[in-house]
Each structure stands twice: as C-alpha cells, then as structure tokens.
Image (cartoon, grey):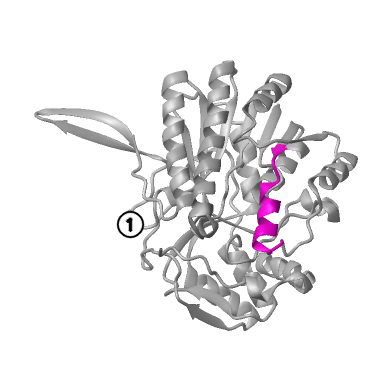
C-alpha cells in the first residue's frame, strides 16, 4: 500500500512509519517538525539524541528495501500543497499523528490552549475535507486517546466508542447507537473529543473510511526497527510537559531522582508499549473488514494505578517516591476497566509490562543520563487558572 504518515517525525509516528516501511509498504512522511520547535520553546530536549528527519530517513533508506520519502508541510495551513501531494501520491491510507499530543502543554496558558485547538482541529478537518473532495477510497487512521472517555465513567468494561441506546420519545422507543459520552480532562483531550464528531460528520455525509484509535499512555523507547541503527533512535521525553508517566518514572529511577507521584497516586491509567502502538497502526491499515461506520478501537494493553506502578519501579531499583501537589483538576480515585477487544480480534499480541522490559528502559535512561536536565523533571503546568 501507499501510506502517508502525518506527523511521522514524532514519538509514535516515527516508530509506526518504520514498521509500515519494514512490512513492505510505500511510506511518505508529512511533518512540519513542530515537535522539535516545541523542544526549543520549552528548552527541554529528548533524553535520547534524535537525529534530524533528513538523517533518519537517509539511514533508513540505506538499510531497508522500501524507501521513505519526506515532505515538510504544515497540514493545518498549506491546504493547496496538501491537496497536490495527495493527488500525486494517490495514497491508499493516511495515518494521522499530526496533532499536538501533550495534555500538560495544552494547559500551560492561553497561547498553548489556542495552538492546540487550532492545530488539532484544523489539521483534522483539512484532511477529511480533501479526502471527501477528491473522492478517493482513502482509509484515514487517526491516533486518538482513551482520555476522550474521561477516567471515571463506569466500573464496567468500557465499550469501544459506542453504546447501544434506547431513546424514549413520549410513548415511543427508538433503538439506536450513540457515541460514548465525552468527558475530556484537558484542552488536548477536548480536541480529540471534537475529532470524534468530525469523523461522525464526514462519515455520515460522504461515506469516508475512518478508524479512530483511542490510545492509552505510551511507554518504551525503541522498536525492532529503531534498533537497527543508532541514527534511528526514537524520542525519549522525560520533562513534565511531554514525558509520559511510566517513562518518567523509569528515567527518574535511573538518575536516583525521587519518583514524582502527583496527588494520591490512586489514579488509574491505560498503558501500551511503543512496539504495540506500531503493531496497532499496521493492523488497522491492513484491516479489510467492511466499513459502515467510524471504526473505534481501544488501543491499550493493561491498566495500572499510578502508585502501584511507582512501587513496581521502587521494588526493582530501591528508588524513593515523593508525592507532589497534583497540577491537574481530576478525580484521584477513579475507575477504569478497558481491554483492546477489537485489536486483539485483528491479531494484536499485547506486550505486558515486565521486570525485563523495565530494565531495558533503565539501561536506555542510564546510557543517556548525562543529557538530562533535572530542572525539567517536575510537572509545572497548572490546570487551575
């Protein structure tokens, strides 16, 4: 297949682009390199020394039969260029990672809130509009988030996107299907909830083929592909705005820095390894089942209460745990029951957190510990205005 990966220079996008290429697909990365610009804005770079996108692709194209092509483009603004490239490439699939992905960053101030809203929503609408306009049978795969559900809806198994519902209108009962009620906890999560409505609209109006992957918290660094050469190494964000909680814990333990547990630690979160993220993108792209609605899959492999996660790291490393004031406005005693039912049906083999995998990540953190800026570890973004 010919596959465009929007945001293919980012943490999940790079790993997924390489997996698709390794599996024999023609991959085209579109990216405006905004994530690298945010590194400079926050003065907080990746713990791992990531190479430029040009060097990354140069190295990949030397060691892999299928070549990756890169186009620098701002999808939220350069609509004519985007249309021209889609016409030229004639993709079978477009994988959409090109959204600002950090909840804390989206809550720093009005500027970051507005950037997250405008970038994420306009980018998504531009892609949907062009697919509808060009009348191509393009499959759009979007990386969403489990956070659209909120983290405290039910003690029962979370459905994959939809509920069967009965609408009572006077004495009549209408059987239907509705989206799970959205309950976002940040501006970032709010944009993903709005994405859901855009997908429903474009699918209803124009019959678009859309898969929305509601992903959990991603952990890990490298994949089988990024380990093929040092210049292919993936990002490792550890700062308070972009670092995901498990990667942050592991990095902090490696540096003998007390684990930053915000609030009570009773919060339950869904998790998935970066290798499984790449697996899920591949499985979604290869899904040949009939599309009569927006396909929604819960993309996680397990859930953890954060304090239990911290204790697991502590048991392995003898590190300290320190509680900090929670910068978020959230229920710290939430419930979350979820499984990747649809993705397992497509063939996903879940990677579960193990001591060996934690030790692998500890080794990565220790190797590049000299690059860490301890002043960037604490979460400073505040939900309260």
- Drawn side of residue 263 relative to residue 73, left or right: left
Q: Looking at the image, which residue sits at the far right?
A: 62
Reply above or below: 37 against 269. above
Q: Vertically, is 154 above or below 57?
A: below
Q: Please tell me which residue lies in front, 100 or 352.
A: 100
Residue 238 on image: x %, y %: 64, 66
User: Quick one: quadrant of the N terminus?
Assistant: top right
Question: Is residue 286 placed above or below 34 in the rendered structure?
Answer: above
Identify the residue at horizontal 32%, vertical 54% (top origin): 154
> Which one is in front, 103 or 96?
103
Rendered residue at 43%/43% (across/down): 193
Callout 1: helix, strand or loop? loop
How many callouts does the rendering have?
Answer: 1
Q: Identify the residue at image location x=59%, y=19%.
A: 137
Image quadrant of residue 328?
bottom left
Side of 40 relative to 167 (left or right): right
Residue 31 appears left or right of 320 = right
- Crowding near pointer 1: few (<14 within 10 Å), some, many (20+)? few
Pick whichever, 117 or 160, lies toward us: 117
Residue ranking furthest to the front:
111
The residue that label 1 is drawn on is 155
Range drawn in magenta? 30-45
Q: Quadrant of residue 346?
A: top right
Residue at 90 percent across and 41 percent down: it is 62
Q: Please provide percent x and percent y for residue 24.
A: 77, 33
Q: Is residue 69 above or below residue 54?
A: above
From this viewpoint, is residue 18 visible? yes
Queried whether the magenta region covers residue 80, the answer comes back as no
Whole-percent x and y of residue 272?
A: 57, 54
């Amino acid at each position: 297949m010919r596959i465009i990966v929007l945001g293919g220079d980012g943490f999940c996008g790079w790993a997924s682009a390489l997996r698709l290429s390794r599996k024999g697909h023609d991959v085209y990365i579109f990216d405006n390199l905004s994530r690298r610009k945010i590194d400079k804005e926050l003065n907080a770079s990746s713990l791992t020394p990531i190479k430029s996108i040009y060097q990354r692709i140069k190295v990949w194209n030397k060691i892999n039969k299928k070549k990756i092509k890169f186009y620098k483009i701002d999808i939220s603004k350069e609509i004519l260029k985007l249309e021209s490239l889609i016409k030229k490439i004639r993709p079978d699939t477009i994988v959409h990672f090109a959204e600002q992905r950090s909840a804390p960053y989206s809550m720093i101030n009005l500027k970051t809130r507005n950037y997250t809203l405008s970038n994420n929503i306009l980018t998504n609408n531009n892609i949907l509009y062009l697919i509808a306009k060009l009348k191509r049978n393009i499959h759009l795969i979007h990386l969403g988030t489990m956070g659209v559900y909120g983290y405290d809806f039910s003690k029962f198994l979370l459905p994959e996107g939809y509920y069967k519902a009965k609408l009572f209108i006077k004495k009549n009962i209408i059987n239907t299907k509705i989206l799970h009620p959205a309950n976002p906890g940040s501006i970032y999560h709010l944009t993903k909830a709005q994405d859901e409505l855009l997908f429903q609209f474009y699918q209803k109006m124009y019959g678009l083929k859309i898969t929305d992957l509601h992903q959990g918290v991603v952990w890990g660094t490298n994949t089988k592909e990024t380990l093929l050469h040092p210049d292919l190494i993936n990002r490792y964000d550890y700062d308070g705005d972009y670092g995901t909680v498990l990667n942050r814990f592991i990095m902090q333990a490696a540096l003998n820095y007390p684990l930053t547990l915000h609030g009570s630690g009773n919060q339950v979160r869904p998790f998935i390894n970066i290798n499984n993220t790449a697996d899920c993108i591949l499985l979604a792209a290869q899904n040949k089942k009939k599309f009569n609605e927006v396909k929604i899959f819960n993309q996680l492999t397990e859930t953890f209460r954060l304090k239990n996660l911290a204790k697991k790291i502590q048991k392995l490393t003898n590190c300290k745990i320190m509680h900090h004031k929670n910068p978020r406005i959230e229920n710290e005693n939430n419930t979350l029951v979820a499984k990747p039912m649809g993705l397992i049906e497509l063939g996903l083999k879940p990677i579960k957190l193990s001591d060996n995998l934690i030790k692998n990540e500890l080794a990565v953190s220790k190797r590049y510990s000299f690059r860490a800026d301890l002043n960037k570890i604490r979460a400073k973004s505040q939900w309260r205005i």
